[in-house]
């Protein structure tokens, strides 16, 4: 059984995710926001490539049924309801509504996954729940791919560290697992930082940029392990919460 990590969507070739269970990670902040939204009662989350795509898609709904969310250069897209801060995705804002979202890195990574058996959105805030699904896949000898959103196509420390924690969780009790070089490197990064997620964010360029832009509180929320124990599954162009009405 193979576990491969891709440090950014740019590293993926056609077929790399075919037939696999895939975890997409954008810790700062899209995958965190998606988990928070679903845990706070959002009906679904629909990722879109661009702000224009979000607006076009929203016309298929009554305005009261949707939230328009997303960012460019870390800031809320003008005219949208929400940005890309997990603190904005409260139950009051999203419960019972469909969230249409477009972000610089996370939604691009998600939309780039092709032919996967299952796609789960992973982060620190839903670590144990998402990791349990990946371990189930590993026990059935299903290959796993972990796709880091990165930052504008480049390596990001926080996504790699989070991926490393997932790698270590998947392989703890599994036998005969083959890791690619990136998966081994991510596991080493996670081991270096341990539970000091705040230090990861402080050391990462994107974490520092968010803090400087006034989003320091987002960093705290994004580092709260298991604070939103949901398994967001991307299927048929939308993300919904795995539960009694959506079992695998």
Image (tube, rainbow, N blue to C red):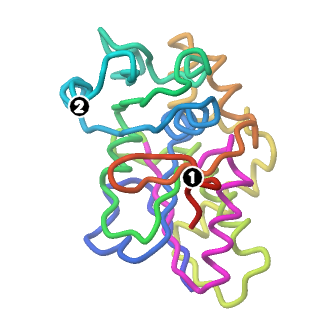
Image quadrant in which you'd find residue 13: bottom left
Q: Report whether 65 appears left or right of 219.
A: left
Q: Residues within 10 Å of mark 1 (few under 14, many from 20)?
A: many
- The span shown in magenta is 122-150
Residue toward you, 19 or 65: 65
Q: Position of residue 224 (x, y in %)?
A: 75, 34
- Residue 176 is tagged as none
Image quadrant in which you'd find residue 196: top right
Q: Residues within 10 Å of mark 2 (few under 14, many from 20)?
A: some
Quarter in which the N terminus is drawn? bottom right
> Is residue 29 placed above or below 92 in the rendered structure?
below
Residue depicted at 66% across the width and 60% down the height? 166
Quarter in which the C terminus is drawn? bottom right
Viewer-nearest of discs 1 and 2:
2
> Is residue 74 placed above or below 233 in the rendered structure?
above
The residue tagged 1 is 160
Magenta-colored stretch includes residue 25: no
Q: Report whether 66 appears left or right of 144.
A: left
Q: Position of residue 93 (x, y in %)?
A: 53, 16
> Is residue 17 placed above or below 36 in the rendered structure?
below
Q: Earlier in the sequence, mark 1 or mark 2?
A: 2
The residue tagged 2 is 57
């Amino acid at each position: 059984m193979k576990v491969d990590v891709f440090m950014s969507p740019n590293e993926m070739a056609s077929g790399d995710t075919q037939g696999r269970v895939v975890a997409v990670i954008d810790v700062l902040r899209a995958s965190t926001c998606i988990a928070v939204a679903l845990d706070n009662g959002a009906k679904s989350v629909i990722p879109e490539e661009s702000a224009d795509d979000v607006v076009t898609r929203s016309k298929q709904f009554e305005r009261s049924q949707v939230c328009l969310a997303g960012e460019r250069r870390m800031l809320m897209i003008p005219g949208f309801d929400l940005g890309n801060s997990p603190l904005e995705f409260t139950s009051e804002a999203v419960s019972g509504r469909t969230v249409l979202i477009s972000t610089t890195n996370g939604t691009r990574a998600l939309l780039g996954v092709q032919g996967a058996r299952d796609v789960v959105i992973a982060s620190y805030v839903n670590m144990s729940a998402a990791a349990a699904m990946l371990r189930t896949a590993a026990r059935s000898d299903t290959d796993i791919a972990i796709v880091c959103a990165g930052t504008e196509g480049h390596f990001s420390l926080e996504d790699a560290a989070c991926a490393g924690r997932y790698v270590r969780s998947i392989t703890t009790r599994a036998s005969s697992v083959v890791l690619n070089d990136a998966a081994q490197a991510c596991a080493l990064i996670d081991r270096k930082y341990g539970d000091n997620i705040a230090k990861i964010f402080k050391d990462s360029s994107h974490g520092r940029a968010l803090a400087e832009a006034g989003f320091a509180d987002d960093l705290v929320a994004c580092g709260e392990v298991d604070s939103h124990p949901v398994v967001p599954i991307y299927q048929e162009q939308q993300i919904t919460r795995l539960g009694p009405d959506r079992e695998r």
